[in-house]
Amino acid sequence: MKKYRSYRLSLGWQILIGLVLGIVLGVVFYQNKLAITAMQNIGNMFISLIQMIVLPIVVSCLTVGIANMGDIKKLGRIGGKTIIYFEVMTTIAIALGLLVGNIFHPGSFIDIHQLHSSDISQYVSSAKSAKDSGIWATLLGIIPTNFFKSLGEGDMMPVIFFSVFFGLGTAAIGKQGKIIIDFLDAVSQVMFRVTNWVMHTAPIGVCALIGVTIAQMGISALAPLGYFILLAYGTMAIFIVVFMGLVARMFKFRLKDLLFVIKDEAVLAFSTASSEATLPRLIDKMDKFGVSQGIVSFVIPTGYTFNLDGSAIYQSLAALFLAQAYHINLSLGQQITLLVVLMITSKGMAGVPGASFVVLLATVSTIGVPMSGLTFIAGIDRLVDMGRTAVNVVGNSLATVVIGRSEHEFSEEKSQNYLEELRTAKVK
């Protein structure tokens, strides 16, 4: 009897099909309130499923990783390297956005008064509260007064802070801590299994999320800002290929191998415009790719707050775009000031909902652009957000491998075996 092998689409292809179907549904149900509500709720349900599993994975993996590391000096060294790397890459991303904006002048080709404006009141209130809080409030906010409250609110940095100290404390008590390590290791394995189940719903979630975006906005709204969108995506592509490629070469590994490993996660991040959607699988994959668990569980969650390369490119390019649209000529000194302000503001508003747009709101006033100017690009923010989220995910994966190799905690053998396993699965 002849056996027939069933063909199964990979998650990446399923998500891409969901993306295309979502665009079609968005066009078909343009301005249809009933369909928009349905798609919005289905999309939110998928994001909620992801948020449900993110923090348990972060707590369990980070605590176990730090406990196994056990050395506070080593943790301090890794933390210092990580923050410096994040700062350097983010600064390069901001500078690249400014450079591209100066060369191609995207704002010079549009009439700002002919663009459709969107409501940005939710971002304005976020920007005001973030501005009022200041850098000291941000630093104080990292220390949780109530860990379970931070866990319930999904506040990532206090959770990371507590988990690091809990892991160090677990390591400090020796054999007694092994029961905690075994328990949390089991928790992480359970949550990774749940993640695999949740990922089966990803194509439906993606379809709904992109569908509601197109249905609300319409394809025609993209035309006037098409050049800016293309330029933003082109700049992000240059950053990945050139700058991330150079970093990978400096640390003696191939960027294309990393991209091959995380391709499904990059597609998922692009489709959902949510970094959280990829975090559980990214932690699992970077561990399998050869980076030690302690480094993976520390660098990736921290990077989700402080290493947003795609967002940095968008913020600098958008700020320059709006200045040009309002015919505001910025001197070199003003642009350097803009770079510094973006560096500080983006870190101070980490974790604020709609952070990239909120950072822009807090920044453009320093270069003379009216706050109302942002209403003209708010409509396409979601579409650019898809690209910048994918770049953020690639950037955090790269950072994990870089820190792992710099600490000599990257297994070349494990990496090659995992790559071979993925290639074999693809052929089958």
Image (cartoon, rainbow, N blue to C red):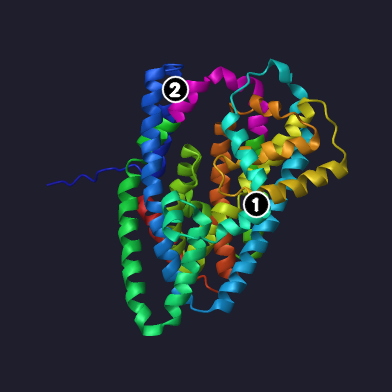
The amino acid marked with disc number 2 is Gly
Q: Residue at x 62, y 47 (%)?
A: 349
Query: What is the number of the mark on residue 347?
Result: 1
357 part of magenta stretch: no
Farthest residue, direction left:
1
Nearer-the-camera pick, 249 or 390? 390
Q: Which residue is mark 2?
A: 26
Nearer-the-camera pick, 13 or 68? 68
Residue 3 vs 82, above or below: the answer is above
Disc number lying in front (1 or 2):
1
- Secondary element under disc 1, as helix, strand or loop, is helix
Residue 50 vs 365, above or below: the answer is below
**Inter-mark Cα distance, 1 to 2:** 35 Å
The amino acid marked with disc number 1 is Lys
222 part of magenta stretch: yes
Question: In the rendered image, which quarter is residue 49 located in?
Answer: top left
Would residue 37 be found to the left or right of residue 359 on screen? left
Would residue 254 be found to the left or right of residue 428 on screen? right
- Secondary element under disc 2, as helix, strand or loop, is helix
Would residue 115 be found to the left or right of residue 164 on screen? right
Q: Position of residue 308 (x, y in %)?
A: 61, 49
Question: In the rendered image, which quarter is residue 311 located in?
Answer: top right
Q: Position of residue 346 (x, y in %)?
A: 66, 48
Query: What is the number of the mark on residue 258?
Result: none
- What's drawn in magenta, residue-wise? 210-231
Q: Residue at x 66, y 41 (%)?
A: 359
